[in-house]
Amino acid sequence: AYALIAWILVHRLGCLRGDDDDVAAAGRALIDQLMLGRRLETLLRELGIEPQEAVRQVAALKLLVAHQGWYRRLDPERPAAHLVEILLADEEACRVLGVNEFAGATFFDRDGYRELLWWLLATARLELAAAPDAGLLRRVLAVGRALAAAEAPSAYRVDALLAALEPAAGDGPPATAG
């Protein structure tokens, strides 16, 4: 919850750069430049949060700022799989997801996955509350349902998760596209 509260306070930080094209990237960079991550981590520790959890909350803040508006940039033919690919390319997201290698396979942590899914859906809902778009909200919720449904069958393997999220050949656009 700390990451979400911090996100509410700083997610538009990138607007200070005056570049509307990539507010997310500018905001993410400013978190580091202004040392807000370190300050938040220190504050969380002072509040009694365990050091490892404080680091996770800062990582979550950084990834939520970097991926704000994520639902606007997804491939409409395979939105849930595309989102997972985007997240797997992000170091902070991999940290929150608990991505790890074991016996030649890449796994993710169940709790990290659920937490990240909750954060992404919560931030999307907050963003969309400011500028309601029923169609976009339906697509966001459909992506969330697809990600939740793919969790158990994946056995927490990244390759199986991606496979479960890909539309079957010849099926046309998946249900998560609209």
Image (cartoon, helix red, strand yellow):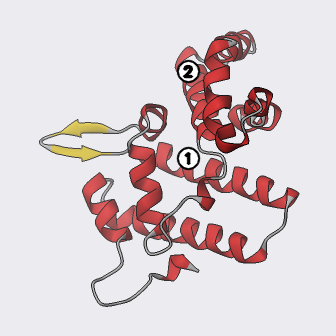
Can residue 22 be seen in this snapshot?
yes
Q: Residue furthest right?
A: 130
> Residue 24's mark?
none
Q: Earlier in the sequence, mark 1 or mark 2?
A: 2
Q: Which residue is mark 1?
A: 116
The crowd level at tag 2 (other Cα within 10 Å; few <14, some 14-19, many 20+) is: many
Q: Is residue 43 left or right of residue 51?
A: right
Where in the figure is residue 54, as x and y percent of width and height? 61, 21
Relative height, residue 83 to residue 91 (above, below): below
Q: Residue furthest left?
A: 104
Q: Which residue is mark 2?
A: 55
Q: Is residue 8 left or right of residue 75?
A: right
Work out whether residue 28 or residue 154 is closer to the camera in this orientation and state it: 28
Q: Residue 67 is drawn in which quadrant?
A: top right
Q: What amino acid type should be assigned to the residue bearing mark 1? A: Leu
Where in the figure is residue 95, as x and y percent of width and height? 44, 32
Relative height, residue 80 to residue 117 (above, below): below
Q: Is residue 41 left or right of residue 149?
A: right
**Do the numbered discs 1 and 2 sit on residues whose CB atoms are within 8 Å?**
no
* Helix, strand or loop at mark 2: helix
Q: What amino acid type should be assigned to the residue bearing mark 2? A: Val
Q: Residue 17 is drawn in which quadrant?
A: top right
Which residue is at a point 34% across and 61% down the rendered structure image?
161
Which residue is at a point 77% across and 32% down the rendered structure image?
18
Where in the figure is residue 45, as x and y percent of width and height? 67, 12
